[in-house]
Amino acid sequence: MSTTAEGAAGQADVERRRGGFSSRRVFILAAIGSAVGLGNIWRFPYVAYENGGGAFLLPYLVALLTAGIPFLLLDYAIGHRHRGSAPLSFARLRRGTEGLGWWQVAICFVIAVYYAAVIAWALRYTLFSLDQAWGDDPEAFFFGEFLQVGDPGVTADVVPGVLVPLAIVWLAVLAIMALGVQRGIGVTSLVFIPVLVLAFGALVVQALLLPGAGGGLDALFTPDWSALTSASVWAAAFGQIFFSLSIGFGIMITYASYVGRREDMVGSGLVVGFSNSGFELLAGIGVFAALGFMAQAGGVAVGDVATGGIGLAFIAFPTIISEAPAGALIGVLFFGSLVIAGITSLISVIEVVISAVRDKFDTSRLTATLAVGVPAAVLSLVLFSTTSGIFVLDVVDHFVNQYGILVVALISMLVVAWAVQALTGLGDHLNVHGRPRVGTGWRVLVGIVAPVGLAIVLFFAIQTDLEAPYGDYPSWLLLVLGWGMVVALPLIGFLLARMPWRAGTHLDGPPPGSDPAPPLDPAPASTSGTRPGTVSEEGGSR
Amino acid sequence: MSTEAIVMMIVAMMVIWGGLALAITSLVRHGAVEDRTEQPRHDL
């Protein structure tokens, strides 16, 4: 057997141990499950309404086609060609960039810790919907009886009503992760995504039948063309596309590494990108139809009740559920959809960390799941099942999203495009089996347009935070859990990158069998039995 | 609903959901061609 064949066989064995999706369909459903999350349901409708209504469609589509999908394809190309978790893929792309991958891993760990808490709230509210446990004042119920919110800060006062559902969420997630890529993530996506579409579709139909629904849709879709001259509206569109597609922080790199080598990653990316936007549009119609009903019932304008995020999910929707016919059904469909969308996103986030640990330390699936999942679950339970959980969540979410994800995505993109100059090779890889072909246009979008778009989003975020400190939180909370986290995560990432890889790990270049084949190394084969660019048995890098 | 809002809603649906349908169709067609062309390579 030739050296090349031996390398390919060894790589095939490594990939068998890593696991993978059984088919393109499973991968696409998993990627859609990752992209479609809480933000699609509670963020997009309000962002669209606030930024020009129907006119927002134009910057939104421009952002999707010029930045979202091209960046998604970049992530796919990195993971699919280099066949590894985010750190391993970056290390294979160029050894010095491995820290970017670990930075993404650190961000994912933090996101997983707090994201689970919101899913736990939604899980509890699915049950609350059955008897409208919030009574006449959903806002007072949410902050008072349910979360038992105290003063801003960090406390150790446990709220059992949050602790129990949060523990259930983590047990479910750990069970899914322990089952592996196909039997865990793949099967969950195969079951959950169709259920999510059916449940949310039923919710939309139910919402459209409510009196006043037309008024809500009118508010959402009536275009304000003057908004198109505002830079902040374009930044909002790029921000929405960027945050909702799960790009730039390791998820799509990891998932793409689990896809068969001959799959069409360009076509898959287009399906995932448009599916994500398609679900956002569906969410916009459902949410604003329901808000139209709420406005009519209260005798106020839609603008007076329109909101997003936690306010939409846990205050506005309970109000709608209490007043609407078949409210319990609407509640179960809405909060059930939040739970499903949240779980499929959470497993993708935590998989970034598990995959990186497995690649680096060569552990079994179960060991890596426990090594990552147990500390994450404990932290999550300690920080977010207390009376101060919502404050911590709000601060961490704001800073990790605005500055963690945005900055690492921007830097990664610039490094890949300009420092490593890998776009041509990655484009060639996409073109081996992908259609439509990517070429100069894609390289311009990824190398210039998308980074400029992200930089503008980042500029507006920084400007907003400099004008006034975020929220009414104590300075120490913003410094420690906000800015402190933003600074700590890249440091942790680059420290982790200094740890040695497990013996035999192929580094510096795509592994054997990748298309198009990497150039042959003219150096003679090593007498010690390890190939150039692999890690020796002692764990030292050659 | 105003005419303007209805038009924008229909345009949004046609562009986004239409784009999704096109993307799926393209992927299925290309996937099928790819499978046929790749099959002989398997036998070699």
Image: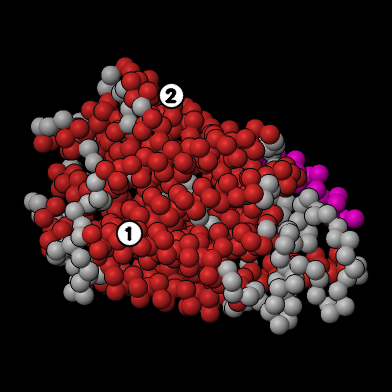
Residue A158 in percent (x, y) is at 20, 74
Near mark 1 (Cα within 10 A), the count class, few <14, some 14-19 or many ≥20, is many
Q: What residue occupies the far top of the structure in this picture?
A: B3
Bounds of the magenta segment = B27-44
Near mark 2 (Cα within 10 A), the count class, few <14, some 14-19 or many ≥20, is some
> Which image quadrant: the C terminus of chain A?
bottom right
Visible in this render: residue B21? no
Q: CA gap, disc 1 to disc 2?
A: 40 Å
Of residues A378 and A168, the one nearer the viewer is A378
As for residue B31 lying within the magenta part, the answer is yes
> Which image quadrant: the N terminus of chain A?
bottom right
Q: Which mark is residue B11?
A: 2
Residue A210 in percent (x, y) is at 22, 35
- Amino acid bearing label 1: Gly
Q: How is the image coloured?
A: secondary structure
Q: Which mark is residue A194?
A: none
Tell me where residue A127 sits by quadrant. bottom left
Q: Secondary structure at mark 2?
A: helix
Residue A522 in percent (x, y) is at 89, 61
* Residue found at x 37% / y 66%: A113
- Amino acid bearing label 2: Val
Viewed as shown, does residue B32 lie left or right of A472? right
Q: Using the image, name the chain to which the residue with label 2 belongs.
A: B
- What residue sits right under mark 1 in the picture? A482
Visible in this render: residue A405? yes
